Image (cartoon, coloured by chain):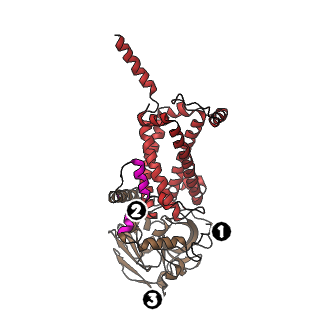
Amino acid sequence: MASLTVTDEQVTATKSKVIQPAWVRVMHWINALAMILMILSGWQIYNASPLFDFRFPREYTLGGWLGGGLLWHFAAMWLLMINGLAYLVTGIATGRFRKKLLPITASGVLHDVRAALTFKLGHDDLTVYNYVQRLLYAGIIVVGVLIVLSGLAMWKPVQLYYLVMLFGDYPAARYVHFFCMAAICAFLVVHVLLALLVPKSLRAMIIGR
Amino acid sequence: MAKRPFLIPGVDKRLLIKDSIKTMPDVTRRRFIAGGASLGALTLLTGCDVIDSSSAETMLAKVSKFNDAVQAFIFNPDALAATFPESAITKPFPFNAYYDLDDAPDISAADWKLEVRGLVDNKKSWTLEELHKLPQVTQVTRHICVEGWSAIGSWTGTPLRDFLKLIGADTRAKYVWFQCADKDGYNSPLDMRSALHPQTQMTFKYAGEILPRAYGFPMKIRVPTKLGFKNPKYVVSMEVTNDYKGGYWEDQGYNSFSGS
């Protein structure tokens, strides 16, 4: 009997320790792949007609030339969009976004930024996001939505004219698309760096706990 | 658009790159689509060689075909491209081709005729004088290049659908295929629904003046619902056909529908 009780306890304990449920992990890594493909092929496309006075190094572009970059971009977009949409729907339907990312308060963010800069921000309980994490994760979801909408506006400026209007005009949508990419790249640097600094968070995103 | 930086004075980098890509043998160019050093990075990230170039190429070609179907599906024949006031026109409107302006076709109006072929009742060729007599309309729309830049211009000409009606074209056919006078024989297929779009135009004038050589004299097909490369210049013939005959850029990997 005693052993049975222990088993029960173990089961409950194990359950509560799941930090990242399977759907989050699967969608996270699909998104990671889709993002890398979109960014590298996007740089190829950017290089054909740069918005600013620089080009991305050829070694970091996908597709070999503009036509190849476009093929990659318009293939990986399906992966990004379908996975992203599934993530948004599941995140809202399961209440995960509300539970994990809200509320975000200015005082909370300020407090945690200060704590982080003085290396006092703890990561003892990975199931609870601190305010900096909440802000960044919620923010990157908004950026993700914006980069898809501006991308769609550029892909179908006549059929999806209302999207072009949302951004002002076609060239404006291009700039929005670019700056969203820049924001995602900046996020990626911080995100990967912190995952390496707190390896158990990386483990949680791979095996769940 | 900001002025482009020049690598060598007088040489446009983009044209230079295009030229150098064009000099690659076909196979090398296609390999480049899937190949390149960037794949090395992917291999490092995934720890395995997930993308061997020929299977990646096949996959990408399939997705591009799928994208053609998706775009045809969401194409609304009544959705009009935005029009702009004359004050919005981009000046100067850029010359754009895979060759230098000096190499652009220099067509004499007297010698030129528009050939009409395929599934049409009346296959007579048209002189420029005859075409100029057809009713014309002017529209100010945004030309969007596959490269990402765009420019607003004013084009005047005859709606293509009126001309197709006039020559008794079978509008149930799948494509109107245009052949051009550019060196290397530029051509491009246009799906029939886009050809019948109210804004698709046989263009004879730019900014109220007879189309200059840079913009496609004597005739350009202006399709505001398509990317720029699907707006052929220096057109010499059109063929109404059910066969997909490919196109200059389409054959190299640009998405064939490339609609806006």
Label 3 CA crowd tier, 10 Å (few <14, some 14–19, many 20+): few
Q: What whole-number distance in Å separates the C-alpha atoms at marks 3 and 1?
A: 36 Å
**Circle 2 Cα neighbour tier, 10 Å, few/some/many (<14 / 14–19 / ≥20):** many
What's the residue type where badge 3 is placed? Asp
Residue A29 located within the stretch drawn in magenta: no
Can the viewer see residue A141 in this picture? no
Please tell me whether mark 2 sits on a helix, a strand or a loop.
Answer: helix
Chain A drawn colour: red
Count residues near mark 1 (Cα–Cα under 10 Å), then give few for <14, some for 14-19, many for 20+: few
User: Which span of residues is magenta-colored?
Assistant: B27-52
Q: Residue furthest top?
A: A1
The residue that label 1 is drawn on is B87
Q: Which residue is mark 2?
A: B33
Of pointers 2 and 1, the one earlier in the residue sequence: 2
Q: Mark 1 is on which residue type?
A: Ser
Q: Which residue does the numbered mark 3 point to in the structure image?
A: B111
Percent from the top left, x then y, of residue B109? 49, 87
